[in-house]
Amino acid sequence: MIGLELPLWTLGAAYLAGSFPTAYLVGKANGVDLRTVGSGNLGATNVYRTLGWQWGLLVYLSLVGAGIAAFVFYTHRDNIRRLMRGNERKLGGDKSVQEGGMT
């Protein structure tokens, strides 16, 4: 499994990004329960058919954006790991446990 050694938290982050209920929130903001109208699906097409193209486009872009973010994160994971390690080092330097900084 070369290249698939991602930390467990990345799976959780990807799950949360993909499960964010944009369509549900848009429907509720407009006083509509999208699960009970149209196809009953919480997707961009049902939002488009029920609330109009502007709201449908917003939901579609949020879904596409979550997918793009996951892809970019995965393809740049080495750079992100380096950044995270740098932040951990900075935190360790500023708030050293030996100096009582993490209390």
Image: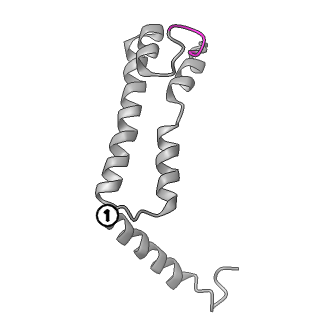
Where's residue 21, x and y in %?
A: 54, 31
Q: Is residue 5 left or right of residue 21?
A: left
The total number of labels drawn is: 1
Q: Residue furthest bottom?
A: 98
Residue occupied by mark 1: 3
Q: Residue furthest left?
A: 75
> Up-down: is 10 above or below 94?
above
Residue at coordinates 53% horizontally, 52% vertically from top-left? 12
Q: Is residue 38 left or right of residue 73?
A: right
> Up-down: is 22 above or below 35?
below
Magenta residues, start to end: 34-38
Q: Residue furthest right?
A: 103
Residue at coordinates 34% horizontally, 63% vertically from top-left? 1
Which type of secondary structure does the marked residue at label 1 adopt? loop
Q: Quadrant of the C terminus?
A: bottom right
Where's residue 89, x and y in %?
A: 46, 80
Give 49 or 86, whichever is nearer the viewer: 49
Give 91 or 27, whichever is nearer the viewer: 27
Where's residue 98, x and y in %?
A: 63, 92
Q: Amino acid at mark 1?
A: Gly
Could you tell me what secondary structure mostly forms the magenta stretch? loop
